[in-house]
Amino acid sequence: MHRDGLTDIEAGVVGDTREPWKRCSDLRRFGHIVDTGRTSLARLSRCESMVCSITEAGLDYLAKLEAR
């Protein structure tokens, strides 16, 4: 849905997840999301934040979860 990628905080809002940086860190470690090399200015902190996008492995894993 967000093919251009999201920051960890944006992903947390979309996924309604507490402490999204921890979950996104896990997803990066498992190869389900990857740093796009782009940054986005965070609204609240006004800091540049890494933008990540889903990988093929992440899409495959998501499809398996949705099939349950």
Image (tube, rainbow, N blue to C red):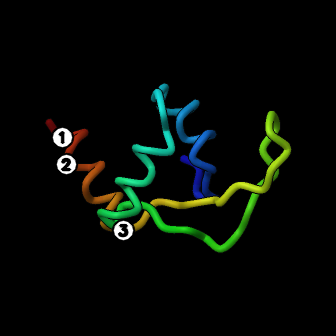
State left or right for residue 53 relative to residue 29.
right
Query: At 55% from the left edge and 41% from the top edge, which residue is drawn?
Result: 11
Q: Residues within 10 Å of mark 1 (few under 14, many from 20)?
A: few
**From this viewpoint, which residue is outermost toward the right?**
46
- Rendered location of residue 30, percent (x, y): 29, 63
State left or right for residue 68 relative to residue 6.
left
- Rendered location of residue 43, percent (x, y): 82, 38
What is the three-letter code of the residue carrying label 1? Ala
The answer to which of 55 and 35 lies nearer the viewer is 35
Q: CA distance from mark 1 to mark 3?
A: 16 Å
Please determine whether, in this image, residue 17 is positioned above or below residue 67. above
- The C terminus lies in which quarter of the figure? top left
Q: Residues within 10 Å of mark 3 (few under 14, many from 20)?
A: few
Which residue position holds label 2? 64
Eye-nearest disc, 1 or 3? 3
Please determine whether, in this image, residue 59 is positioned above or below residue 17. below
Which residue position holds label 1? 67
Q: Which mark is residue 56?
A: 3
Query: At 18% from the left edge and 40% from the top edge, which residue is drawn?
Result: 67
Q: Sequence-wise, which precedes: disc 2 or disc 3?
A: 3
Is the C-beta separation of discs 2 and 1 under 8 Å?
yes
Task: Name the element at disc 1.
Answer: helix
